[in-house]
Image (spheres, helix red, strand yellow):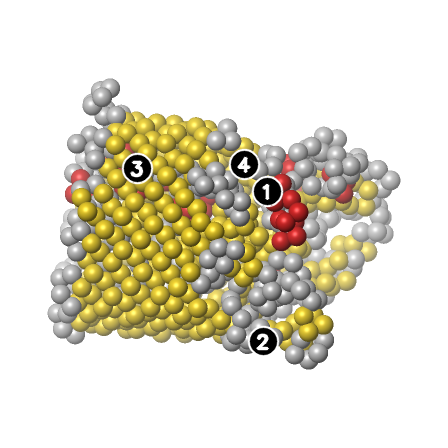
Amino acid sequence: MAETEADARDDAAPDSIEVIGHPDPEGLLPDQTAPKAVSAISTDFIVKQAPTLNAFQLVNLLPGANVSSSDPYGLSTSSSLTLRGLGQDQIGVLMEGAPQNDIGYFYAYPSQFADAENVRQITLAQGAVDIDAPVVAAAGGLLSLSLDDPRSEMGRLVNLSVGSYDQRRAFLRFDTGTIGKTGLKAFVSYSNNRADNWRGAGYDQRQHVDAKLLGEWGDGNRASLSLSFNEAKTSAYPSPTMADWQAAGRGFNHDERYDPTGASGSLGGTNYWRLYRAPFRNFYAAAPVHLKLNDRLTFDSSAYLQLGHGNAPYGTQLSETGNFLGTEELAQPITLPGAVDGVATVLGNWTGKQFRVGDVSKLTFEAGAHRITAGLWFDYGTDRVTQSYTSIDAQGHPLDQWGYQDEAIRTADGRLLAYENARTETVTKAFFLADSITVTPRLVVDLGFKGVDVLRNGRNYLPGPQQTVRTDSFAALPRAALHYTLNDRQQLFANITTSFRTPNEFALYNSYYGGEIVGAGTTSLKNEYSVSQELGYRYIGPSLSFSLTAFHYHFRNRQVATVVNSGGALVNSTVNGGSQTSYGLDGEIDYRPAKGVSVYLSGEYLHARLDDDLPVGGDFLPTKGKHAVSSPSFQFAMGSTYDDGRLFGSTALKYVGRQYATFMNDESIKGYATLDLSVGVHLAGLIDAQRMDLRLNAINVTNPHVLSGVYAVSTNAQDTVGRGGTVISGAAPAYYVGSGRAFVATLSRAF
């Protein structure tokens, strides 16, 4: 059989590629023994997809995964993943055991993750999260990326791609092989990707570096260091309201040309596309270690580092006079280059500079029927957020896209002119203890407890009544699970787990406008706490495997993700939705009728309802019994792969049902379906003996014109009479626009 790109990434025999445990590596449903719902995709599926896709897009077929992408290539940060109706800020994300979520807002951005060619497996736990996972705010589950190990033999891999919208991508990877007699081996890769915006003016750029150093010795001892660097300048696609969508459809975009006269319809050219290009630079490091101390005792540690700086800019206007800094009125005018009649169009900056370091370590001791795990997790992070302003030139080009303070507009006495200016320090400490008890050869019972403390200390640098903030939260998180083996093909499992999250850091700080407090920061917001249960069945056969999982959640103080306008910047925030109850059913089937052929089906039914009326102002909206937002009742997916050693291909069909955008359920988006296709040929043996593949991917081939998800929820879209008789004004939610059709051709060659 001709060697595939997957072979180029691992020089071991084909059997070792079975990273998800199947006798047939093309299978999309992994063998599992964990007492919880878990799904996964492996190298053999990933290499058939467009290499531009990010991790969220790749897991779209798995049960409960609802993915909204603003562009077909996954370059834009305007994307969303929900699991069982729970938002992106409630899904923990790990890469090589290191957390990828930001500590201030709990979001993870998939366009910053490792290149798909370096990913060995993506695992998705839709509910219960591992007790040792270094994440908070993970009631929605856990997405884990495992990188390829470096190859034992020296080698190179080159992927070249071209596609729709002038998309061009190059990927190069070098494996050192085993280095001398050290036993160490490593790889390093570099990729460069760019594409025009598929709607509206502008383009996206991304440069990325991944590297991994691995050492293995003795009886299962292992240590590695993984590095990932990402630099990108991407477009923030505008998110329309329903009225915008009905009026303009896919034509709701930023302006192609800068027009300070406002003739294009935007105020002073503030809608010009160059004012909405978001530059980000991120660095991640993970250093997992596994040591076998003796036959009964092992030690595991995973240290990590995260650095980031980025800007989510926007166009706005400033006046030379009448400005405030916090509550302080500025007596002297500010200098604004290019001002006309005392007013200038400027770049509004929302810059974030993050630092995060931590380690999770555990000891595991086996004694008879008991497998006891005890561990500690420590995490320290800082987030420096500044909402400042930068001048633009006569053509509308910002003098500095990154929002650095040395180029920012200042007051007459030299202070930074800022709408928001704060620094938050977050310290997370946790301990956990678990015991896995083999009661009988067929029955295993797991018991565990985790205690988590999250401390936030903050400083608001704006003049006003608030200088410092402090909040400290502790949560006790017990859990239990059981796994029963009926026979060598059938399993039953059940679990009960708990989770919590604090409100994000934006809620801590005062916001000012015109010298007055327009948003009062508070440290008294209640934490979300949830209890969830799963009951499942698995069947693992030689050609047919399937799993079925029933789940139930109950939330107190459900934190619902939304986006708010803070002085022109669109900022992630949360709404306390009160109590919520959700239950449903996940299922997936993998049928492998012949070698190299796999057919995969998955589906979900979700019943998610609000248990309380929602307080708004001094009244209550009648929301009890309403559907939870962004929680489609039905999802269905069908995928297939084919590989006969010469030709290969795949299909991916996904249907997502109706999604409500308001707590009152007075506005929603219709269900929709997408279809991705791929076809390719293994060229090894036709030209020479070197590994070479050529493939064509069609993304969203049916090109439906749809709204694909809820970007910003609202309490009610229409004016509504509250329980107390007052009229509660409606506010329009905003939406993600489903991405357009794209084609990508990729030539892959190993040396």
Q: Amino acid at mark 2?
A: Asp
Q: Earlier in the sequence, mark 1 or mark 2?
A: 1
Q: In the structure shown, which secondary structural element does the residue marked by tag 4 occupy? A: loop
Residue at position x 70%, y 53% from top? 567
- Say whether disc 1 or disc 4 marks the residue closer to the N-terminus: 4
Q: What residue is disc 3 on?
A: 649
The first of marks 3 and 4 along the sequence is 4
- Sequence order check: which comes first, mark 1 or mark 3? 1
- First in sequence: mark 3 vs mark 2: 2
**SS at mark 2 in the image:** loop
Q: CA distance from mark 1 to mark 4?
A: 10 Å
Q: What x and y, as percent, mark residue 573?
A: 58, 60
Mark linked to residue 250? 1
Q: Nearer the viewer, residue 100 or 374?
A: 100
What count of labels does the image hold?
A: 4
Asked whether disc 1 touches disc 2, contact meaning CB atoms under 8 Å apart, the reply is: no
Helix, strand, or loop for circle 3?
A: strand
